[in-house]
Amino acid sequence: MTPLKNSDVINKYDSYPSDIRVRLLELRELIYEVANDEESIGAIEETLKWNEPSYISKNGSTLRIDWKRSKPNQYSMYFNCKTRLVETFRELLSDRFQFEGNREIVFQKRYYI
């Protein structure tokens, strides 16, 4: 796992329910894996934007991930609404993911028995 370095981001992850924290950290790691595999993305800066963990590259769009108390059974990845990223994901993966507008992929919390 890519180490967390930013204390504000660490505190934000610590504020999530443990089951959600695990899922968000999985998304975080996926962001870093893709960035490491794709040289054109470049270095990722991890910070908080709108009080959400955010991942910024000089060569790409900012990604944010978060969970909201108002929707406790889901968490999301947010994209810049001026890009076609969500539209493209919707075209390719509409059978696998839920989408909100042109900026959000919604993931459902998984339950295990």
Image (cartoon, helix red, strand yellow):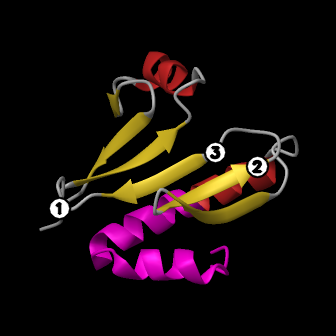
Residue position marked by numbered label 2 in the rendering: 57
Q: Looking at the picture, which amino acid does disc 2 mark?
A: Ser
- Please provide the residue range marked out in magenta: 1-28
Q: Quadrant of the C terminus?
A: bottom left
Q: Looking at the picture, which amino acid does disc 1 mark?
A: Tyr
Q: Residue at horizontal 44%, vertical 75%?
A: 12
Q: Position of residue 77 (x, y in %)?
A: 45, 46
Q: Position of residue 48 (x, y in %)?
A: 55, 64
Q: Position of residue 111 (x, y in %)?
A: 17, 61
Q: Residues within 10 Å of mark 2 (few under 14, many from 20)?
A: some
Q: Is residue 21 magenta?
A: yes
Q: Position of residue 19 (x, y in %)?
A: 29, 72
- Relative to residue 18, is residue 2 drawn left or right? right
In the image, residue 48 sits, relative to residue 100, either above or below, namely: below
In the rendered picture of this protein, how many numbered marks are placed on residues? 3
Marks 3 and 1, Cα distance to the nearest angstrom? 30 Å
Residue position marked by numbered label 3 in the rendering: 62
- Relative to residue 61, is residue 75 drawn left or right? left
Q: Are marks 2 and 3 in contact (CB under 8 Å)?
A: yes
Q: Residues within 10 Å of mark 1 (few under 14, many from 20)?
A: few
Q: Residue at horizontal 64%, vertical 78%?
A: 6
- Which of the two marks, 2 or 1, is nearer to us in this view? 2
Residue position marked by numbered label 1 in the rendering: 111
Q: Looking at the picture, which amino acid does disc 3 mark?
A: Thr
Q: Main secondary structure of the magenta part?
A: helix
In the image, residue 1 sits, relative to residue 83, either above or below, namely: below
